[in-house]
Image: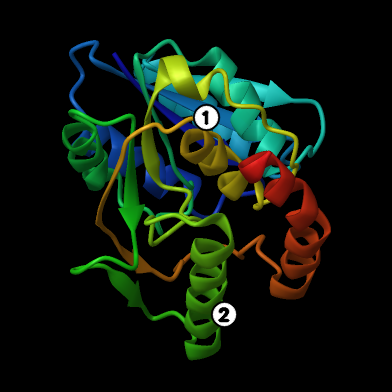
Amino acid sequence: MISAVVPAYNEEEVIGKFLDALVRDLPHDGSYEVVIVNDGSIDRTREMVLEVSARHPWVRLVDHDGNKGLGKALETGIAAAKGDIIVTMDSDLTHPPAMIKDLVKGIEGVDVCIASRYVKGGGMEDVPAWRIVVSRAANLFFDLIFWTSIQDLSSGFKAYRAAYLKQAPIVSAGFECQLEIILYFIRNGLKHREIPLMLRNRQFGSSKFRVVKMGMKYLKNLGRFLAYRWR
C-alpha cells in the first residue's frame, strides 16, 4: 500500500479541490490511502475532509486538538500511515496529486524519491522572483555545508520507504523539519533519486510560510543539524 500523508491547517479554500484531485488521480483499489492530518484548524477543513472520507473510506482524518506545526503533523501522519511507501505533500495544490504515481515509480531501487525544483525539467511558476532567489540560495548553502548531491533539500514532496521514515527523529515543529528528515537519510547512507517538479504558486487560500520567521528557525537549528549530520 502507498500512504499519502498530508498536513492541513485552515485550508478550507483549497482542501476540497485538493481532495477532488486525489480522488480523481489515485486508484480506488485498496493500493492507496490518504491520511489528512488536521493540525488544529479553526475553519471548515475538518468537516470538508470528513465529507470526502464518508464517500471514500481510504481517505482518513487524524486530528490534532490544537495547532502544533508541520513537524508534529508529519510525525502524527507518518505514525498513522499503513503503507510500505509514504508520500508527504502539501494540501494547497502546489504539489500536483497526479505526480504521486511518478514518485512511487521513482522510488524503485532507492529509499527516497524527491520531487525537485532544481533538477533538469523542474522549476517554479508564478512564484515571486525574490522567493525563488531565497529558496535557491538556501538550497545551495545546504548542499555545501551538509556535503550532499541532493539539489532540493527543502522539498516537502517526497516518497519514502516507510521502514526508514518511521525511524527518522522529527524534533523541529516548523518547515525546517523537511531538512531534518532528509538529513536522517543522508546520515545513514540511504539511496535517493530526484525527479523534476514544476511547483506552481498556490492559487487558493493563504500561505503559512513566513520567510523571515522560517529563516530564523533554520539559523536557530543549524548547529543542531550540523552536529546531527557530521557526528
Residue shown at the point (46%, 66%) measured from the top left: 202
Render colour scheme:
rainbow
Q: Position of residue 84 (x, y in %)?
A: 34, 14
The type of residue carrying mark 1 is: Ile
Q: Which residue is mark 2?
A: 134
201 to the left or right of 69: left
Q: Position of residue 76 (x, y in %)?
A: 64, 23
Residue 118's disc number = none
**Helix, strand or loop for disc 1:** strand
Marks 2 and 1: CB-CB under 8 Å? no
* Above or below, comparing residue 134 to residue 68 in the picture: below
**Helix, strand or loop for disc 2:** helix
Instruction: Report the label total.
Output: 2
* Above or below, comparing residue 46 to residue 192 in the picture: above
Q: Position of residue 107 (x, y in %)?
A: 24, 33
| Residue nearest the viewer, comparing 227 with 60 | 227
Residue shown at the point (78%, 54%) measured from the top left: 223
Asked which quadrant contains residue 184, the reply is: top right
204 to the left or right of 45: left
Judge the density around disc 1: few (<14), some (14-19), many (≥20) Cα neighbours within 10 Å: many
Q: Earlier in the sequence, mark 2 or mark 1?
A: 1
120 to the left or right of 127: left
Residue shown at the point (48%, 54%) measured from the top left: 92
Question: What residue occupies the far bottom of the structure in this picture?
Answer: 129
